[in-house]
Image (cartoon, helix red, strand yellow):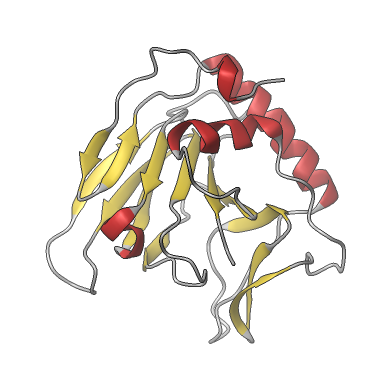
């Protein structure tokens, strides 16, 4: 079982883009496979769901959560809930995932929510801010697994010039400071760019302090 003391001392340094700290290739291949195994246990307890927006529009990603709170979306709006829509509580956040948070966000409070988003080849995530939390001083940590995803970084308000980078399997991104409320999204998945998931696709894990 991996904890923060097990992480190699020579992890890549972050490249900062508009305040987003990008750690390329943070996870080794073995760590990625172990994390996927942990995610399969989460999905077995809290199955992936296909959420809709408040307007009733289906989202193209499927998602589930771990931790004391999970993120849900339906016609009642976006919110955190202590229970999966099935009524059960969310599984605990696996140690393999918590170790990444502890390594790249030292001093931050323990995450209360771990969102797990699955992207098929046509899935996207529109430009958005993460504003459903109450403490914006705490970072959001994102882990990418599987096929490459083109990540777009915007500004503190909608519109204006953006920058993109490809997030690859094993990459970690930290959104903190002023960048914590910058608009961002995923506008393309590159199929068959990773062998991690037997049927392809991309998994994005985001860790957050909610309250």
Q: Which quadrant: the N terminus?
A: top right
**Residue 184 in view here:** yes
In this orientation, which residue lies closer to the viewer: 153 or 21?
21
Q: Where is 148 relative to 157, above or below?
A: above
For image coordinates 43% across by 13% down, the residue present is 9
Q: Where is 172 relative to 132, above or below?
A: above
* Side (left or right) of 64 relative to 164: right
In this orientation, which residue lies closer to the viewer: 148 or 46?
46
**Residue 119 in view here:** no
Q: Which quadrant: the C terminus?
A: bottom right
- Furthest toward the front, the residue is 107
Residue 200, given in percent of the width and then of the height, sits at 56, 35
Q: Where is 88 relative to 27, above or below?
A: below
* Side (left or right) of 139 relative to 35: left
For image coordinates 44% across by 35% down, the residue present is 104
Residue 82, given in percent of the width and then of the height, sits at 76, 67
Q: Where is 183 relative to 34, above or below?
A: below
């Amino acid at each position: 079982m991996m904890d923060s003391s097990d992480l190699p001392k020579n992890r890549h340094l972050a490249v900062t883009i508009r305040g987003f700290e990008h750690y390329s290739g943070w996870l080794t291949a073995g760590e990625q496979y172990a994390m996927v195994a942990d995610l399969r246990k989460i999905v077995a307890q809290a199955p992936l769901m296909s959420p809709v927006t408040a307007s009733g529009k289906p989202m193209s990603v499927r998602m589930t959560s771990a931790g004391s709170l999970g993120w849900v979306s339906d016609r009642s709006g976006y919110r955190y809930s202590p229970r999966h829509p099935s009524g059960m509580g969310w599984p605990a956040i696996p140690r393999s995932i918590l170790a990444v948070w502890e390594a790249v966000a030292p001093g931050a409070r323990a995450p209360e929510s771990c969102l797990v988003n699955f992207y098929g080849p046509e899935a996207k995530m529109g430009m958005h801010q993460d504003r459903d939390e109450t403490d914006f001083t705490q970072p959001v940590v994102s882990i990418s697994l599987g096929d490459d995803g083109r990540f777009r970084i915007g500004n503190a308000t909608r519109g204006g010039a953006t920058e993109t980078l490809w997030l690859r399997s094993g990459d970690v991104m930290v959104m903190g400071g002023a960048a914590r409320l910058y608009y961002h999204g995923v506008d393309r998945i590159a199929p068959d760019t990773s062998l991690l998931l037997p049927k392809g696709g991309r998994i994005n894990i985001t860790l957050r302090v909610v309250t």
